[in-house]
Amino acid sequence: MSKSGRGVVEEYWRRLESGDVPGAMGLMAQDVTYRMTGKTPVSGTYHGMAEVNERLLAPVFSRIQGLSLVPDEFIGEGDRVVVLAHGSAKTASGEDYVNEYAFVYGVEGGKIVSVAEYLDTVEVETKMFGKKII
């Protein structure tokens, strides 16, 4: 019997927290749709793990290090699960990056098939990309 959607998402976060990033990414469908909200340089909708890695994860992780994401709450059953989380890291320039998140996951066949990420985009713009907001 396959895990419930919530079970898949909880396992994804367990793997992330334990440092098993490849194992966590293995729970995502190869044709995943990942949407990062906002108007930041990395905001947009990405199709497939190759595009997620190239256009979202690589630019983000070139600007921050030591990202720690902690789930605060899992909400939902079935094929739609919301995770409220918080995270922190150091930017390439040594600043503290601190953010709060809401992730909405779609799960089918034991794999994460969609992700929508909501976060404080001002923190992304100012800390990761060095933009000044007046």
Image (cartoon, rainbow, N blue to C red):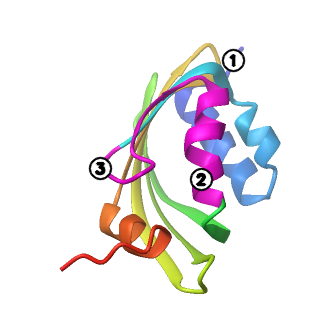
Between residues 97 and 2, which one lies in front from this camera angle?
97
Disc 3 marks which amino acid?
A: Lys
Q: Which residue is mark 3?
A: 39
User: What residue is shown at x 31% (from left), y 68% (from top)?
Assistant: 122
Between residues 129 and 86, which one lies in front from this camera angle?
129
Between residues 133 and 49, which one lies in front from this camera angle?
133
- Image height check: is 131 above or below 81? below
User: What residue is shown at x 54% (from left), y 34% (from top)?
Assistant: 6
Q: Identify the image quadrant of residue 126.
A: bottom left
- Left or right: 92 as drawn, with respect to 34: right
Q: Secondary structure at mark 2?
A: helix
Residue bounds of the magenta highlight: 37-61
**Sequence order check, earlier mark of 2 and 3:** 3
Q: Which residue is mark 2?
A: 59
Magenta-colored stretch includes residue 41: yes
Tags 1 and 2 touching, CB below 8 Å: no
Disc 2 marks which amino acid?
A: Pro
Total number of numbered discs in the rendering = 3
Kindly report the distance in space between the C-alpha atoms of the residues bearing marks 1 and 2: 34 Å
User: What residue is shown at x 58% (from left), y 63% (from top)?
Assistant: 69
Disc 1 marks which amino acid?
A: Ser
Q: Nearer the viewer, mark 1 or mark 3?
A: 3
Residue 2: which disc? 1
